[in-house]
Amino acid sequence: MFDKILEIKKIRAQKSDLSERETELSKPILSDIDTIPEVYRWFLELIEISNCPSRPESSALRKKFIFIVLLIYAPAVLAGGRMPLGLREKIGSVFNLKDHTFISHNIENVVFLYQNYKSFRREIDYLYTEIIGRLKIEGLIQEESGA
């Protein structure tokens, strides 16, 4: 009988530890979504000078940007969490999209692409690292944040 109580205590402690870790991992690098257009400008500059082939209006490029923005502003969304209010609309506005559901419909897809396609992952990692570097240079994030 007492073993049951001890197991419950152990489970509660593990749940607490896991909850703390989830909160830590889910913390956004940036929360000011008004910086998204600037991040998008940098993204396009990086695409232009990199070996990441895509037209600025292409679906593949939008997916890469969505993944990077979610990593920066709402990483938990990539693991099934809820989208923060206003984020979907702000992302959609940089693409001049009227239907912002495009963003939601592509979340699982971009996670799949990142997990399963080395070239997609390599491009995302490069772009993300470069954008994080620019955010640091601009003083928008601290040196220990992010990458």
Image (cartoon, rainbow, N blue to C red):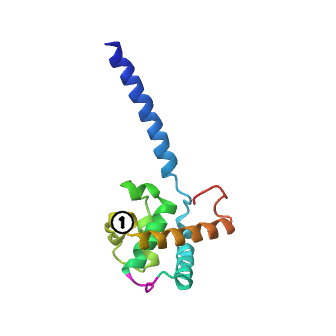
Residue at (43% x, 73% y) in the render? 119
Camera sees residue 82: no
In percent of width and height, residue 65 lies at 46, 72
User: In the image, is residue 100 above or below residue 48?
Assistant: above
Q: Is residue 130 left or right of residue 115?
A: right
- Nearer to me, 126 or 24: 126
- Nearer to me, 98 or 76: 76
Kindly identify which residue carries mark 1.
116
Residue at (44% x, 39% y) in the render? 18
The image quarter containing residue 14 is top left
- The three-letter amino acid code for the residue at tag 1 is Asn
User: In the image, is residue 28 above or below residue 47?
Assistant: above
Residue at (64% x, 61% y) in the render? 141
Quadrant where the C terminus lies? bottom right
In percent of width and height, residue 36 lies at 53, 70
The image quarter containing residue 62 is bottom left
Reply yes or no: does residue 33 show up in magenta.
no
Q: Residues within 10 Å of mark 1 (few under 14, many from 20)?
A: few
User: In the image, is residue 67 above or below residue 19?
Assistant: below
Reply yes or no: does residue 57 show up in magenta.
yes
In percent of width and height, residue 60 lies at 39, 78
Name the element at disc 1. helix
In percent of width and height, residue 40 lies at 52, 76
Camera sees residue 59: yes
Q: Residue furthest front?
A: 118
State the extent of the magenta-drawn residues as a range: 53-58
